[in-house]
């Protein structure tokens, strides 16, 4: 059972478990949640953290990782040796201060044999949403919850592109928590500023692991014009609420120039991996907007000629979650999922492939060579009857494009 956002109980200590290997096997088989729960992080974040028990909000924090490692993810998606690829810059848009970011990132990369990425070397850079110094940490619960999102993002970039530079752009923590007095329309301007800063600092790809309720003013207003930069891969999580219907999606993944990343479960048996659509991966239509750039007419037709989501996918199911380290908010290693895990991973693959100069929204994904993506043909994120009979592909996976997983999961870098 998933606990709502902002219910996360931040653990001051690591719980020691006698058989970490057994827990990892539960991840590989997709059965971890048979005895554990999940809790969402911030209001708009698309990340979920596995907890110590069902209906618990206490993270399952361990002294060693039990989620998928960087090497396992590289094997699952057929990535080349860490030395192969372009050292592009991946910008991460996240919220709040994070005093332990560099040391936590170092712990993750050291654990999985990845080269260091430090501020001193120029590999890691942190700025605020106006391009100034990093936000000053205030120690609030909201900020610590957001650190779990940020840790997931930067560590997934590290797993997908060990040689990439990481640019963290920090927006105010308050803009990741919505209320009647602080709706999405008040929060997204700082996100737009952060995106502009990322582009101005030379990002090859920009990852956004969040989704705001969309309105026509947001969808077609000035805050969405920041994505009008061909040559930069703007990548956003599709959401963790399953099939959203045929009217509106979340912002910014609904934008025609943003790559919408859906989610899968990732199973491992011996050395073989397989994927199925994650039951909570976001998908649907955005009737305020035209099709995504390069989206085939056969796909946008499911949304009556409008933007159909998603475009591509990777592991997101917390039952088959990834290993993440965060000492500030969680207090150790934890297992995370949500399409927040998929967005930075895909963004880093764009940066690593080195062809972002030709990127214009998801167009290159739809024109990729045969075999660049593995079709995901099982699973669904909504009952078949919840989609219109003529558009069940929006929520049920099958041969070819479908809403939960888009064109499928990567098989190496050739699709980017």
Image (spheres, rainbow, N blue to C red):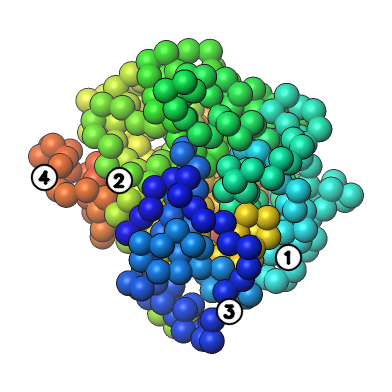
Q: Which of the two marks, 3 or 1, is nearer to us in this view?
A: 3
Extreme residue toward the right, this view = 120
- Which label number is shown at residue 385? 4
Q: Say which label, 2 or 3, has the lower sequence index.
A: 3
Residue that numbered label 3 is attached to: 16
Label whose residue precedes the other's in the sequence (1 or 2): 1
**Cβ atoms at labels 3 and 1 below 8 Å apart:** no
Q: How far apart are marks 4 and 3 (CA)?
A: 44 Å
Instruction: Classify 10 Å Cα crowding around label 1: few (below 14), some (14-19), many (20 and above).
Output: some
Instruction: Specify whether 225 is left or right of 27.
Output: right
Q: How far apart are marks 1 and 2 (CA)?
A: 33 Å
Q: Name the residue under label 2.
A: 242
Viewer-nearest of discs 2 and 3: 3
What distance separates the C-alpha of mark 4 from that of mark 2? 14 Å
The residue where tag 1 is placed is: 107
Q: Tell me which numbered mark, 1 or 4, is placed earlier along the sequence.
A: 1
> What secondary structure is marked by label 4?
helix
């Amino acid at each position: 059972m998933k606990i709502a956002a902002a219910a996360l109980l931040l653990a001051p200590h690591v719980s020691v478990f006698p058989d970490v290997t057994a827990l990892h096997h539960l991840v590989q088989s997709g059965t971890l949640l048979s005895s554990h729960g999940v809790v969402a992080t911030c209001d708009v974040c698309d990340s979920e953290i596995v907890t110590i028990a069902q209906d618990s909000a206490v993270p399952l924090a361990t002294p060693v990782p039990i989620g998928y490692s960087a090497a396992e993810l590289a094997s699952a998606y057929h990535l080349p040796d860490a030395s192969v690829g372009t050292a592009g810059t991946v910008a991460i848009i996240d919220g709040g201060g994070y005093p332990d970011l560099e040391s936590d990132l170092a712990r993750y990369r050291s654990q999985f044999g990845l080269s260091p990425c430090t501020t001193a070397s120029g590999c890691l850079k942190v700025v605020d949403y106006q391009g100034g110094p990093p936000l000053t940490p205030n120690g609030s619960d909201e900020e610590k919850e957001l650190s779990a999102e940020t840790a997931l993002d930067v560590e997934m970039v590290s797993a997908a592109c060990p040689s990439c530079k990481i640019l963290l752009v920090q927006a105010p923590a308050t803009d990741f928590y919505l209320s009647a007095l602080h709706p999405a329309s008040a929060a997204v301007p700082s996100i737009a500023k952060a995106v502009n800063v990322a582009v101005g600092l030379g990002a090859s790809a920009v990852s956004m692991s969040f989704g705001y309720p969309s309105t026509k003013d947001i969808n077609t207003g000035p805050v969405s014009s920041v994505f009008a930069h061909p040559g930069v891969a703007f990548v956003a999580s599709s959401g963790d609420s399953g099939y959203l219907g045929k009217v509106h999606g979340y912002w910014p993944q609904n934008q025609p120039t943003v790559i919408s990343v859906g989610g899968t479960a990732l199973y491992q048996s011996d050395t073989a991996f397989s994927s199925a659509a994650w039951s909570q991966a976001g998908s649907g239509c955005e009737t305020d907007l035209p099709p995504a750039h390069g989206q085939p007419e056969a796909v946008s037709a499911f949304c009556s000629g409008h933007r159909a989501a998603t475009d591509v996918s990777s592991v997101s199911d917390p039952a088959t979650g990834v290993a993440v380290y965060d000492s500030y908010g969680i207090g150790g290693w934890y297992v995370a999922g949500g399409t927040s895990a998929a967005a930075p991973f895909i963004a880093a693959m764009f940066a690593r492939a080195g062809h972002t100069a030709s990127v214009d929204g998801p167009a290159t994904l739809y024109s990729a060579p045969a075999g660049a993506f593995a079709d995901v043909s099982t699973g669904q994120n909504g009952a078949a009857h919840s989609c219109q009979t003529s558009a069940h592909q929006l929520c049920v996976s099958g041969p070819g494009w479908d809403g939960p997983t888009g064109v499928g999961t990567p098989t190496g870098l050739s699709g980017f």
